[in-house]
Image (spheres, helix red, strand yellow):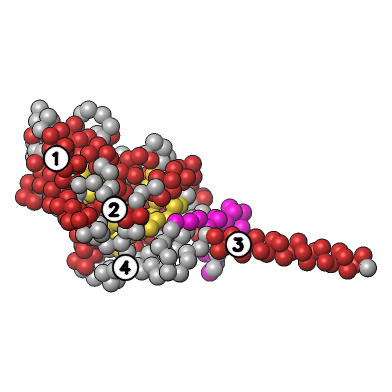
Amino acid sequence: MRRYIRALLLCTVFAVFSGLYVYNKLLYSDLPGHRIKSGFATPRAPGDSREVGDKTRPGTPHWYNRYIMRQQSQGEATGLGRPDTPMHLAVVTCGDRLEETLTMIKSAILFSIRHLHLHIFAEDQLHASFMEALESWPDMIRSKFSYTLYSISFPEDNAAEWKKLFKPCASQRLFLPLILKDIDSIVYVDSDILFLQPMDHLWAFLSKFTPSQLAAMAPEHEEPRIAWYSRFARHPFYGRTGVNSGVMLMNMTRMRSVSFKNDMTSVGLQWEELLMPLLQKYKLNITWGDQDLLNIVFHHNPERLLEFPCKWNYRPDHCIYGSNCASAEESGVYMLHGNRGVYHDHKQPAFRAVYEAIQKYSFGADPVKTLLEPLEEELSKTTHTYCGKNHPLFTKRLSRSLEGVRGRISRGR
């Protein structure tokens, strides 16, 4: 009799835990027919069954499989696809960049036309704050995007070295093709980027890639005589002035599949094989971390890169010494890059004015009355600076974008 009682108790315990497991899976999965909501899948523990030192055996889990925190969107497509398939946007956030990153995301969602899927790489302590902020936005805005939060992760053998490269977490972008293995193409931006027009137009550059091209970036500078790389770099760099990686469009399928020419071996190396040897060779000669490594890669593989105009990555360097971005002078600034902390100090008040205008804007309000007009008033106070003198460039494209937003609001979209 006691045996039967023990067996019954064991079966009961097993049934309870099985029920909890199924409930947990249902809780964090997407429900068919419902708006996509963000959720976490519990990451696998670092101690898995992989043999120590075994990194090549087929089927072996890699570091980038074990630390990912993934939420798959129902029916999510990759690459260009149909007009109704999502665009993918990635950002990396550490330290005190939460609010800055949320403002960047706000600008991307405000102007985007197609659905947007965000891939947010952040320190674990920031995850709850991201979820709280994004889920608090109005349903009309939430329907325009979905998102996934990921832990910061690097290859185990060299994690400490990658973490300290340039700024904490900055080199995470180099590993996006290895982590986001199911995503074909993506836009990566620094947290201090602001979209001033729909990301859809940047995404369209994917269709302009030649069969050999797999990434697109803007030049670091327009004028070699005052450009950083052409004057100070102690390593190879792309083109005449190098490229700036604050805005980077990637066809990651191609990045994972091609072999890259290099100055370390006589044969091409895959992306995964290339990164660490490159760092070991040049780490004493690089200043801007992962951006310098990308410049070295595309110096040896220029046919792999599409160069888009500086209006897609407009920085203080383009106006601090006079106007040095011809494409912005012609059609306005498309994306603003507030590097060197200019959104948060008083060195470049024109940049700060744009940041604060977008940060303070309330979704659903008239964007012309509550964003553009107050911004133009603030910009008129910045003409004592070189960048402030060029402030019409900051609103030339933005004003058109905000008219589009106003139209969508009036149509209830």
Q: Amino acid at mark 4?
A: Thr
Residue indicated by mark 3: 23
Circle 4: element type: loop
Where are the magenta residues, as a range? 38-58
Rounded to the nearest angstrom, the CA distance separating label 1 from label 3 is 51 Å
Residue 49, position in %: x, y?
A: 63, 60
Compared across the picture, whether 148 is left or right of 317 comes to: right
- Which tag, 4 or 1, sits closer to the chain's start? 4
Nearer to the camera, 224 or 169: 169
The residue located at (32%, 58%) in the rendering is 144
Circle 3 Cα neighbour tier, 10 Å, few/some/many (<14 / 14–19 / ≥20): few
Residue 47, position in %: x, y?
A: 61, 54
Magenta region includes residue 54:
yes
Q: Residue 373 got which mark? A: 1
The residue located at (14%, 40%) in the rendering is 373
Q: Residue 109 got which mark? A: 2
The residue located at (65%, 60%) in the rendering is 20
